[in-house]
Image (tube, rainbow, N blue to C red):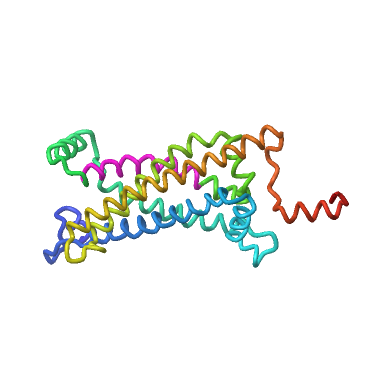
Amino acid sequence: MSDLIEGYIGETVDRKKSRMPAKLDYIQSATGLILGLFMWGHMFFVSTILISKDFMYTITKFFEADFIFDGGEPLLVSGIAFIIFSIFIVHAAMGMRKLPANFKQYQVMKAHANHMDHEDTKLWFTQAFTGFSMFFLGSIHVFIIMTHADAIGPYASADRVWSEFMWPLYILLLLAVEFHGTIGLYRLCIKWGWFDGKDPQATRIKLKKIKKILTVFFLVLGFVTLAAYMKIGYEHAEEGKVGERYHPTAQVQELKINNGRVA
């Protein structure tokens, strides 16, 4: 009965305001922080291809725990992807609470935003749009990783990007993730006052500059990385080797030695 009363009037039976909205806000913030930091780490991981194919292969095998399991265990990556996907679903569910339920509510919110001409309010609309896009784009990507964790590597990933024609999706996903993530982390800092200091207004201005710098940095890094995978995938397809997996330089040299082909 107490839940029913609280559902109608927003107060508990002892006339106290419900703490549930605050708890849900906390969950949304916590999951958003985890996902934002994870995506930055993920971006640095995939960009290792810019250093070398060997380095990207080494990092991939590290996440597969090849220092424990001989050759690595892709199921570990599937497990990580499942955890991230679960957090992603919870975060999306929390975020949906604040989206307009119909076009009329959207019109009201848009009218207020235009009237106030408030930059942070406009950022919320950008975050809402990119979050909606990510619900579909991100779900596809994470599902592929969960079910094909063994197909991660310099050639396997490049083949997926180019030969499996995933690059258009990754372009849209990259834009959505980087705008949503940097705006979200900025708004978290403002909402919870993490770096307010003695002058919150000055801190807000600094955080906006940092947000813009991070957005540009990760967008540039993301597009350069995607271009690298497209180039590798294209060359792999031209050689008719789509589907072949990458072998580290040391393994290739060892194979040549064993076959007596070293000059």
Q: Main secondary structure of the magenta part?
A: helix
Q: Residue at x 59, y 37 (%)?
A: 231
- Residue 27 position, x and y percent, is 32, 59
- Tell me: residue 158, above or below residue 6: above
Tell me if 223 is positioned left or right of 262 in this view.
Answer: left
Q: Residue at x 85, y 55 (%)?
A: 258
Outermost residue to the front: 263
Is residue 127 covered in magenta? yes
Tell me where residue 107 sits by quadrant. top left
Outermost residue to the right: 260
- Residue 16 position, x and y percent, is 13, 64
Nearest the camera: 11 or 28?
A: 28
Tell me if 251 is positioned left or right of 75 in this view.
Answer: right
Is residue 253 covered in magenta? no
- Tell me: residue 181, above or below residue 238: below
Nearest the camera: 45 or 87?
A: 45
Tell me if 135 is positioned left or right of 257 in this view.
Answer: left
Tell me where residue 237 sits by quadrant. top right
Nearest the camera: 222 or 77?
A: 222
- Residue 39 position, x and y percent, is 44, 52
Labels in figure, total: 0
> Which segment is the magenta one?
121-142
Q: Residue at x 42, y 48 (%)?
A: 218
Position of the N terminus by quadrant: bottom left
Q: Residue at x 65, y 36 (%)?
A: 235
- Residue 169 position, x and y percent, is 48, 37
Nearest the camera: 58 or 8?
A: 58
